[in-house]
């Protein structure tokens, strides 16, 4: 049922992952994933290294598209992605909506206790709160307008 609902949302243009959520990682490395975000991500998702000192959370559909593209690469290019796949984790939240973030991924993203989870269209990202707010401070209305213009939006 969960899989059908996720596909229905995507077909109707409702599959976009959005929002900003502030949470804490507990002493055991567990992070609560908010209900709205769990609904957008689906019942099973993948946690992997992100591109900007953060972690990426891919819903099953996004992960499948990503791995299909990866599978089409020549071996000389695909070997560069070994670390991403070696450190990726399949996640199913526990009954309290938490996932465990392995230590090696917390270290990669420099995650401490306070984190921010943001929606980024086809995935979510987990950032150290300090790093995310520093990134966000750099965005001004002028920079946003220039970015939209450069993307022809």
Image (cartoon, rainbow, N blue to C red):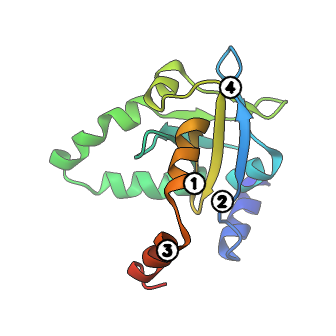
Q: Which residue is mark 1?
A: 123
Of label 3 and label 2, which has the lower sequence position? Answer: 2
Between residue 20 and residue 98, name the one nearer to us. 20
Q: Nearer the viewer, mark 3 or mark 1?
A: 3
Q: Determine the image quadrant of residue 90.
A: top right
Of label 2 and label 1, which has the lower sequence position? Answer: 2
Label 3 and label 2: CA atoms lie apart by 25 Å
- Circles 2 and 1, Cβ within 8 Å, touching? The answer is yes
- Circles 3 and 2, Cβ within 8 Å, touching? The answer is no
Q: Which residue is mark 4?
A: 25
Residue 17 circle label: 2
Q: Nearer the viewer, mark 1 or mark 4?
A: 4
Label 3 and label 4: CA atoms lie apart by 34 Å
- Circles 4 and 2, Cβ within 8 Å, touching? The answer is no
Q: Is residue 32 visible?
A: no
Label 3 and label 1: CA atoms lie apart by 26 Å
Q: Is residue 80 above or below residue 140?
A: above
Between residue 37 and residue 117, name the one nearer to us. 117
Quadrant in which the N terminus appears: bottom right
Label 2 and label 1: CA atoms lie apart by 6 Å
């Amino acid at each position: 049922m969960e899989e059908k609902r996720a596909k229905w949302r995507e077909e109707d243009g409702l599959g976009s992952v959005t929002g900003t959520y502030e949470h804490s990682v507990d002493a055991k490395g567990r992070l609560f994933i908010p209900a709205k975000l769990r609904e957008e991500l689906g019942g099973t998702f993948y946690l992997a290294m992100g591109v900007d000192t953060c972690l990426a959370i891919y819903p099953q559909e996004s992960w499948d598209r990503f791995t299909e593209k990866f599978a089409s690469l020549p071996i000389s290019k695909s070997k560069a992605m070994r670390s991403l796949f070696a450190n990726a984790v399949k996640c199913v939240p526990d009954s309290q909506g938490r996932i465990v973030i392995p230590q090696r991924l917390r270290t990669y993203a420099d995650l401490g206790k306070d984190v921010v989870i943001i929606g980024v269209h086809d995935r979510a990202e987990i950032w150290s709160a300090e790093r995310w707010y520093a990134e966000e401070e750099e965005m001004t209305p002028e920079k946003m307008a220039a970015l939209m213009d450069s993307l022809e939006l």
